[in-house]
Amino acid sequence: MSSTATIPPLSGTITVEVPVERAFRVFTDAFGSWWPAEYHIGQADMATAILEPRQGGRWYEQGVDGSECDWGRVLAWEPPHRLVVTWQINGQWQYDPDPAHASEIEVRFTADGPDQTTVTLEHRHLERLVDGQALRDGITGGGGWTSLLELFGKAATNQA
Amino acid sequence: MDANGAAGLGLLGDPTRRAIFELLARRPHTVGELAQQLPITRSAVSQHLHVLKDGGLVVSKAEGTRRIYRLNPDGVIALRAYLDRVWAEALTAFGKAAHAAPLDPEQEDR
């Protein structure tokens, strides 16, 4: 295997029964209200997480002690249809400020109708996070995002 | 089937292994430290760690008389498995929030 092997992006699609503006707004403005608090990297327990609503904005967590810990940056801010953020949390579960080590998450919101939105996610450039570390065979199969979006779909349906 | 071919999903499909994995994601632990935080015996923790090591998610290292377990630092597998898990839970939570949100927050706020 080449040491420059890339990891195929994780991707998937789901449809939810909410208008596109609402889906985008909840995902972004209300990010801290739904992001599971156990998934954070700061030393302190997480109080909230914030996605600044502009290109170049910060994506970061705030600890209960007021400390802040970056996760990434907003690369594209195109409400209500598209959002691209970097994910710069490395294999040591720490923020890596080097842009060359940034993976990207793109979220697209497409209106299928007035009350239905298709949300498409892609997490790409995962190989940048590991930057030349040994890439193993057999890890390049996809499917992760599809299964998580199925979970999301079930949750959305149950809430409808 | 190739053990690595299952990536992280199968390995983390077991809730106890997921709990161990998430504890190790926070910091390295010994078997005893893991057992203190989980409702299972040290022997059961060891068995789960063995599976996680075989799957490439976890590595261990002897420090004095103790053996310390941590996530595989070269861990593309660990990373993918972890991100799968993070996003699965995050999007489930997002779905609930989207359906619970008021249609027009400006009006609701006033």
Image (cartoon, coloured by chain):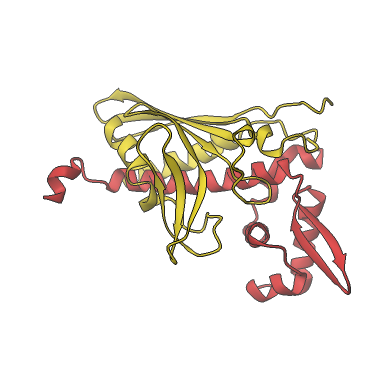
Q: Is residue A17 left or right of residue A152?
A: left
Residue A19 visible here? no
Q: Quadrant of residue B76?
A: top right
Residue A49 point in image, percent of width and height: 42, 51
Q: Colour of chain A?
A: yellow
As rendered, which of B84 and B29 lies closer to the eye? Answer: B29
- In the picture, the quarter occupied by the N terminus of chain B is top right
As rendered, which of A160 and B30 lies closer to the eye? Answer: B30
Task: Please count the marks in the image.
Answer: 0
Instruction: Tell me the residue at 63%/32% (across/down).
Output: A100
Q: Colour of chain B?
A: red
A145 relative to B74, above or below: above
Residue A72 point in image, percent of width and height: 51, 41
A98 relative to A47, above or below: above
Instruction: Tell me the residue at 70%/70% (across/down).
Output: B34
Residue A81 point in image, percent of width and height: 35, 26
As rendered, which of A92 and A112 lies closer to the eye? Answer: A92
Residue A156 point in image, percent of width and height: 37, 42
Q: Quadrant of residue B98?
A: top left
